[in-house]
Image (cartoon, rainbow, N blue to C red):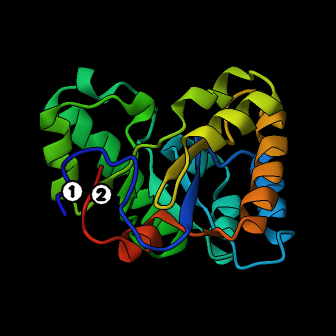
Amino acid sequence: MSNSAVIHKFITDEKVVAFTFDDGPNPIYTPQILDVFRQSGTSAKATFFMIGNQIEQYPELAKTVYSEGHEIGNHTYTHPFISKLGEQECADEVIRTENLIQETIGSKPLTFRPPYFDSNAQAEEFIASRGYTLIGAVNGAAMDWEQPGVRHIVEKTKESLSPGSVLLFHDGFGDRSQTVEAVRILVGELIAEGYRLVTVSDLIKLSSGKEV
C-alpha cells in the first residue's frame, strides 16, 4: 500500500469503520467525545488528529485520550494550508508536532491528516518519508465544522459510509455540541448495525492492502 496519497477508505472484508476527530485537544468537547466512546458498552476506539499548539496547551488531555486506547495522529502545528508552505516550513509543521506527540504520550504518531485535505506532491512525499499514512475521510458532505444541524451530520455520514470508511468530525475550534450529539447517535446506531469502531491504524491492519 502506498503511503503517499491521501486515503479516504480502506478495502476490508470486515464491518469496521474509523471515527476521527480534528483540531483538538479541546477542554470542552474532547472529554465529551471520550464519554461517548466510554459509554458505548463496547471496545470502540477513535483517532484524534491533534494540532501541536493545542497539545502544548492541554498535554494532560492528550495523555488521557491515549491512555483510554485511542490513537493520536499528526495534524500539523498551526493548521496551515500545507501546499502553500515552503519545504522547510512544511517539515517544521510536521516534525514539531511529531516531537510534541512523542514527548507527551511516549509514542510516535503513524497517521497524518492534512488540514483542509490540502496537500501537494512535495508535501505528501515528505510526510510519507516520515513513515506516515495520509488520511482523508468519506463524509465530507456532513460538514460538521459548519454546524449544519445534528440530523444533517448523521444523515450525510450514513449516506457515505461502508465497511472500511474513515469518518471525519471535529472536537476543536468553535461550538462542537452538534458534533458531539451526532457522534453519540452514530456510535449507537453503527454498533447496533454490527459495526466495530476502530482506530485508523487498526483499520489499516484489517485492510486488504488496497486503497480507494
Task: Indicate the position of residue 180 as horizontal and vertical percent values.
Answer: 80, 44
Taking 2 as reference, is 201 above or below it? below
State how far apart marks 2 and 1 are (Cα): 5 Å
Taking 166 as reference, is 123 above or below it? above
Task: Indicate the position of residue 106 as horizontal and vertical percent values.
Answer: 47, 76
Residue type pointed to by label 1: Asn
Which residue is painted at 71% across and 45% down in the image? 26
Taking 204 as reference, is 124 above or below it? above
* N-terminal label among 2 and 1: 1
- Foreground pick, 120 / 15: 15
Which residue is painted at 62% across and 27% down in the image? 143
User: Which disc, if any, is residue 203?
Assistant: none
Which residue is painted at 55% across and 48% down in the image? 161
Marks 2,1: beta carbons within 8 A: yes
Q: Quadrant of residue 110?
A: bottom left
- Foreground pick, 85 / 170: 170
Task: Indicate the position of residue 119 as horizontal and vertical percent values.
Answer: 27, 31
- Foreground pick, 122 / 155: 155
User: Which disc, if any, is residue 133?
Assistant: 2
Determine whether the residue tagged by mark 2 lies in a helix, strand or loop: strand
Q: Quadrant of residue 128?
A: bottom left
Q: Quadrant of the N terminus?
A: bottom left
User: Which disc, if any, is residue 3?
Assistant: 1
Would residue 207 be seen by someone viewing this image from the given angle? Answer: yes
Say left or right for 19 vs 137.
Answer: right
Q: Within 10 angstroms of label 1, few (less than 14), some, or many (20 or more) residues? A: some
Task: Indicate the position of residue 173 as horizontal and vertical percent values.
Answer: 67, 30
Would residue 28 be seen by someone viewing this image from the given angle? Answer: no
Which residue is painted at 17% across and 26% down in the image? 86
